[in-house]
Amino acid sequence: MSEHQDRPADAAETAPDSGDTSDEAKGSSRRKRITLIIVAIVVVAAVVGGVLWYLHARQFATTDDAFIGGDVVRVSAQEAGALIAVPVTSNQQVQAGDVLARIDDAALQAELALRQAQLAQARTAMGEAEAGIAEAQAALAGAQSNAAGAQVTAQNARTKADRYAALVDETGQTSISRQTNDDTQAAADEAEAAATAAATQVKTAESRVAAAEAQAASAKANIKAAEANVAATQVSVDHTTITAPIDGQVVQNNVNLGSYVAAGTQLMAIVPNDLYVTANFKETQIADIHPGQAVDITIDAFPDVDFSGTVVSIQNGAGQAFQLLPPQNATGNFVKVVQRVPVRISIDKPSLADYPIGPGMSVLPRIHLDD
């Protein structure tokens, strides 16, 4: 009896277990449905988000291949010598015209004084040549006057001689003495000889005028040469004072007071205040980019600052075409690679003067294609 009584008890204990199993199955099914719903919601949200992102992103063109650019000026010495002053230091702001360095110009100043003295001598010689021209011209005028008088005298003497000769007939009878006729003929010959000599003196005086003018021309040429020498030496003297060609910041100061520099030695560089962005976009993006479009600029050094700019220009050609050794694809195997085209972007605001930003720093530009 005890065994029969135990079996119903076991059956009674087993009955509740079946109910628990059914509840667990229902809970598992419910969890699956909830999981599927959540997954479906996530998928739908992802799709909607992707579509919205695409519709938004297609309005912009961006690239991470971008950096700050600037027309950095390399300052070099144009004359050799020892530096007697270097009034600027690295990272110092300078204005155009500020003195960056001075080279000892003692030797050049001495040469300049010599050139100026040579110029003064040339100008003195020019004054003497001009005086010689005036003197030669006066002598020529006197000779021409004498020649004119001698010519008149010779003509009168010859006319008188001819008149006397006409008074002598063929038989030798004459109303004047033969001696008088001979004297008249001799006087005419003498007057003509004097006229010829006076004409020769005119030619001599003309030659002297020409010589004086040639001397003056030579003196004038010497003045120009002396002036050129003075100007060239003055340029060399001016080059010993090295000034900033632009506004900007001094960087890479390579010299100190007392250093000896040769012509062409780079002393320092100046980073201009007017910087820009060079963004290398894929060639497949260029069709939608044009000058004048607004640009959002994020500079890695200042990610919390919203910079803005404008597309200035697009280079006509991919960057690789302007390398020292551009690729030649006419031979061998060829693998097509999307090329990059440099786009220049201005930085309009805020002012870069408030931030230590310079060439080479990384930038993330975003161009508004709908502008």
Image (cartoon, rainbow, N blue to C red):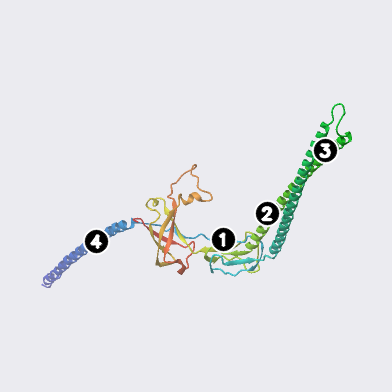
Secondary structure category for the residue under label 1? strand
Does residue 222 appear to the left or right of 345 in the view shown?
right
Q: Amino acid at mark 4?
A: Ile
Which is nearer the eye, 319 or 87?
87
Secondary structure category for the residue under label 4? helix
| Quarter occupied by residue 279 | bottom left
Depth-wise, is mark 2 or mark 4 nearer the camera? 2
* Crowd class of label 1 (few under 14; some 14 to 19; many from 20; radius 10 Å): some
Return the residue at label 1. 74
Which is nearer the eye, 352 or 242?
242
Q: Earlier along the polypeptide chain: callout 1 or callout 2? A: 1
Return the residue at label 3. 188
Measure how far apart labels 1 and 2 are at the Cα level.
35 Å
Q: Residue furthest bottom?
A: 2
Residue 85 x, y percent position in the rendering: 63, 69
Disc assigned to residue 224:
2
Q: Earlier along the polypeptide chain: callout 4 or callout 1? A: 4
Measure how far apart labels 1 and 3 are at the Cα level.
89 Å
Q: Residue furthest top?
A: 171
Secondary structure category for the residue under label 3? helix
Q: Residue at image x 53%, y 60%?
A: 72
